[in-house]
Amino acid sequence: MSMRVASTMPTPYFPPSKEGSERSKGYARLRRKAMLSIWDENKMKIKLRRRARHLLAYSTSAVYLRPNFRTLNPTWAVRNPLDTFPAPMDDVDQFVPDNCLFTYKTSATWLLNNYGDLVANQLRFGNVNSDARYTMLEYTDADSIQLVVLGADDSPELSASERVGLEAIMLEAIPNRTGRPLAVIANRITLDKPRGQFDGVLGMYYTRARLQALTEIAIERGIFPEEYLIARSGENPEILQMADGKTGVLGVIKGGDIQQLQLNPGYKTDTALDRLERQERLEGAIPAEFGGESASNIRTGRRGEAVLSATVDYRVQEAQTLFEQSLMEEDKIAIALELAYWGNTPKTFFLPSRKATAQEVYTPEKIWETDFHYVAYSAAGSDVNSLIVGLGQRLGVGMMSKETARESDPLIADPELEHDRIIAEGVEAALLSSIQQQAANPMGPYQPDDLAYLTFLVMENDESLYEAVRLTDERARERQAQMMPAGAPQTMPGLAAPGMGAEAPVEGGGAPPLEALLSQLGG
């Protein structure tokens, strides 16, 4: 499920702050590219996959934004929802809590290396060893960011010296320059309390596991049955030799009979296991296709897609809609961090270009005129495969423009660059077709020497086609403008037709030869 939710990436849309202004439109495009570069710096594709697992399994996706002074960019930190404690909110659909507390564990080595002056001889360390871990509390709100470490638990097992020290020490307390909370908590839509998509499966899973264990025990006992020695009437039974079926040793008894007790696991055990597994799939909305199987009553691929769509698509759409709202709030926090910490600092990001990478430079205070924007998936509820098919169908019937399709395609990172590349490829194809047509004509401008030189530039010097044509044209112009004495090899047409520009003009001028005039007339 999480792979389907995160198979496509959303796109931020920054509308121009002033409609009709080219400067405003340019800043809007730059804001979008800058935000995409920040996402790329934070490896957002991987983070969204992890967050999708948190949202579906734990019903919550928690993320904490903070400034990174090494990269000079806002940093997304995905937190474990089980260790996240946001403040209660009146609106359950509000993703930004007034304050939030995060907890995590750290080692004594890390603690002493980073805050040794504060905690040494102050914190209650307890029994310090390689497995010792200490709880860190990270609190954030609109005014401050605070970091607290908790000492070891006050256990009677500790010695008097190990129990000495403070229970908690504040390590850092710095002001929050943004003036807004830095945590975003996306909650799955439920009725009255947080509930993951697979919470209802756990009880049935444990029941099936217990029943499966009992079944395997009964099967093992059936392979190695229990044997009892039964005395005959009036006799005292005695075992002379123990039997060993694995080695083929025959047992010998005197005065009695051996009887085997066969265990039957039950004729409905397998049915009960299958019913529990089916109920788990229904409860967790886990179609059989997720495991590479197909139901026996599915006869066509279209029917299989319909069943899978009815099971999965709406849940994927809901999760992606939640991520749209969450990412929009996160982007606003990232913009506030940029303005608060690097407002006047010129920043650089790189975008793919035709040859290598293009560099863009911006100043946060100039481009972030406003943080108003949208974050949207191309088609919420669709994975990457169905999205591509849908785009192709809409283009085929004329319901969608190519520009909109490029913006919606998750494989196209920069629609404007892709548009330029398509035009460049079309013009290049037209230029190549024109060269081929003119080169096929013996009286055309591309004589053998010029065509060979053009090929040499493209094949050996790795020149682009348009640059090779330009250099070939300059070479021909220089040859045609250079006067040579009569009889010089440069004045001879060589393999080219006479008068087609392959030869240099003769010094002294004079009328051109009759053959040249006739060749120009086609005679």
Image: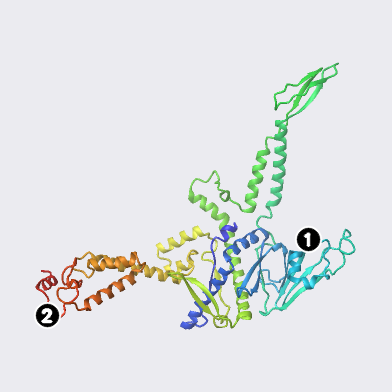
Q: Quadrant of residue 229?
A: top right
Question: In front here: 388 or 224?
Answer: 224
In percent of width and height, residue 333 lies at 63, 75
In percent of width and height, residue 74 lies at 62, 73
Residue sitting at x 63%, y 80% = 341
Measure how far apart labels 1 and 2 are at the Cα level. Answer: 102 Å
Where 335 falls versus 299 (above or below)? Answer: below
Question: Which secondary structure lies at badge 1?
Answer: loop
Q: In front of the other: label 1 or label 2?
A: 2
Residue sitting at x 17%, y 69% = 493
Where 210 falls versus 195 (above or below)? Answer: above
Q: Which residue is mark 1?
A: 132
Residue 265 in sight in this render: no
Q: Which residue is mark 2?
A: 510
Q: Amino acid at mark 2?
A: Gly
Q: Quadrant of residue 335?
A: bottom right
- Report whether 104 appears left or right of 461: right
Q: Quadrant of residue 83?
A: bottom right
Question: Which secondary structure lies at badge 2?
Answer: loop
Find the residue positioned furthest to the top: 234
Proximity of marks 1 and 2: CB atoms separated by less than 8 Å:
no
In percent of width and height, residue 477 lies at 25, 76
Where 49 falls versus 298 (above or below)? Answer: below
Question: In front here: 206 or 22?
Answer: 22
Residue sitting at x 77%, y 24% = 242
Find the residue positioned furthest to the right: 160
* Mark closest to the chain's N terminus, 1 or 2: 1
Q: Amino acid at mark 1?
A: Ala
Q: Crowding at label 2, few (<14), some or many (≥20) Cα neighbours within 10 Å? A: few
Q: The N terminus appears in which quarter of the rendering?
A: bottom right
Question: In front here: 176 or 221?
Answer: 176
